[in-house]
Image (spheres, coloured by chain):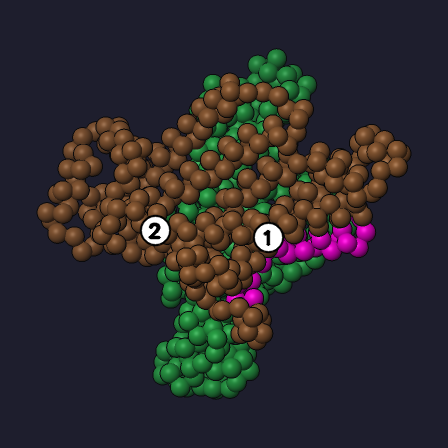
Amino acid sequence: MVWQNWSVRIGGVALLILVLVATAAPWLGTVDPTLFDAASRDLRPGATGEIMTLEGQVLKHTFLMGSDSFGRDIYSRVLYGTRVSLLVGVAAAGLSLAFGVVLGLTAGYIRWLDGPLMRVMDGIMAIPAILIAIAVVALWRGSLPTVIVAIAIPEIPRVTRLVRALVLSIREEPYVEAAVALGTPTGKIMFGHILPNTIAPLLVQGTYICAFSILLEAILSFLGVGLPPDIPTWGNIMAEGRVQFVAYPHNVFFPGVFLAVTVLAVNMLGDGLRDTLDPKMAKRV
Amino acid sequence: MLNFVLRRLAATVPVLLVVAVFVFLLLRLTPGDPAAIMAGDAATGEQIERIRAGLGLDRPIPVQFGIWLGKVVSGDLGESFYYRIKVATLIGQRLEPTFALATLTILIAVVVSIPLGVVAAWRFGGWFDRALMGFSVMGFSIPVFVLAYLLIWVVSLKLGWFPVQGYRRLAEGFLPFLHHLILPAITLSVIYIALIARVTRASVLEALGEDYIRTARAKGLPELRVLVRHALANAAVPIATVIGIGIAILIGGVVVTESVYAIPGLGRLTVDAVLARDFPTIQGVILFFSFIYVLVNLLIDLSYVFLDPRIRY
């Protein structure tokens, strides 16, 4: 029934292709994305040049998407960049969901904690997500775990709010009342009775967080405050390419297109899931 | 009414307090000596000692927070070690470009998105509606810097209509000011248009299903008047709310857009401060942006009284 939705079909297939591309990157005619060759600097897309491997062997290579100002192959860098983007998206979504679920269940079920906890969440939500992420990365310096945590933190309040609202409506259901009357421990009610009923909306929310995280990681890298420049990410490729944008726009456009298509695919999947799994939410826009 | 204003005002206090605690803890939770971090990489031992004394770092954490908060409330955000001036002064200097960019963006977004949303709701399910929904998903997905380079490439480099980068102060003349600002504002407005158009469409659609719309049509009102005076007016509250929530997205977009178009505003300052690890400035900018966000949303909440006469506090 989910699969009959066109948004899910298009987004899902596009994502599947991207996952395959990310996994199979070494076998898709790529070279090591960190290899550079001074003789092959600033090549136009499709040009043939040479690239030297770490062993000193010189390979003939067709630069499908051109090369950057160090003579690195953009095609290889973009394909390997897919790995980083998907990993960050999924990890940040998973992390913020995990924290948000625990906090949301707590706020929704342990009533005296609700007020203070939600005030803290309101406060964090008042700080624009990108600023939290930038500040956290600035403190702990950019590495993959830091960037994932930095992106996940501003999303936690949104998940917490959603879970809390769901818990508040579910806890009034007769089956929860029955469980309470039977003397079921609070922990078991929270995780055994309430949590399973929040899964559909959480899946939808998680998809949106995933899309936003991929976007935010690219923004951080693009601004030069994300992952270190030696890791090929779409944002890093664009950050290096922007200096020469007027003469060689391909350095910015190829990673840009991949980024936009990926985020679009995840968002379409999210919209489709929302329409099929969660009709109540669909009506709320 | 006064009672409501006071209560709503009081509700912003805990929010701002949490923001302050977050910004304060940011530096305390970092491994290393906060005074040394504050002073920057090139500071002398004497400078670090002075900062340590000023922050009261030998006192317990809550006391330190008290000292720091007292300074912030009185407008003292500390001194930027990178620019060697007061952070508050620095923010003041960078305010104009950001304020101009944000205002023009909101203006463009509101003028474009609300009619689009109304027409889509009016022709619900038709080609226009579906096109707008498609555009809306795209608008959410295309990263603002990708869009920026696309527009620079087409509009500035190929067509030559606008300058590629840069900013002109309003004092240098209104036309050059607008000429430099319009492309960044269009870039930034796309995601905002997507957001507002979506909510406008949904809330107008809901209003169009109400009895008073049928009554209005039955008494022979022109369709335009039904749509604007009856449907849109009743959809005003959710639209205003989403404009307020969207300010957070706008601030994020400002940081990126100013960086791409080389606009010397607060967004650019944020990125430069992070690259220079200029923590007093980072703290100041976060506090300032969050304060603006809370303030705008407070004003929007208060505006409900004017948008919907049924709301009485």
For the residue marked with disc 1, what is the amino acid? Ile
Provide residue B304's location: percent of width, then percent of height.
Answer: 60, 30
Give, as a three-letter code, the residue at label 2. Gln
Residue B219 seen anywhere in this rendered image of the structure? yes
Helix or strand or loop: what does disc 2 sit on?
Answer: helix
Q: Chain of mark 1?
A: B
Q: Which residues are magenta?
A: B125-153
- Position of residue A180 in the picture relative to residue A136 (left or right): right
Q: Position of residue A100 (x, y in %)?
A: 50, 36
Q: Quadrant of residue A169?
A: top right
Tell me the tag on residue B254. none
Mark 1 lies on residue: B108
Query: In this orientation, which residue lies closer to the viewer: B15 or A228?
Result: B15
Q: Quadrant of residue B63?
A: top left
Chain that the image shows in green: A
Q: Is residue A16 above or below residue B311?
A: below
Secondary structure at badge 1 equals helix
Q: Position of residue A94 (x, y in %)?
A: 51, 44
As measured in the structure, the alpha-carbon distance from the residue carrying label 1 to the one carrying label 2 is 25 Å
Q: Position of residue B70 (x, y in %)?
A: 27, 31
Question: Could one spot residue B153 in this view of the protein?
Answer: no
The subunit carrying tag 2 is: B
- Mark number, residue B93: 2
Q: Is residue A192 magenta?
A: no
Residue displayed at 15% across by 46% down = B48
In the image, is residue B112 above or below residue B234?
below
Q: Residue at x 62, y 30 (%)?
A: B306
Name the quadrant of the C terminus of chain B.
top right
Which quarter of the image is occupied by the N terminus of chain B?
Answer: top right
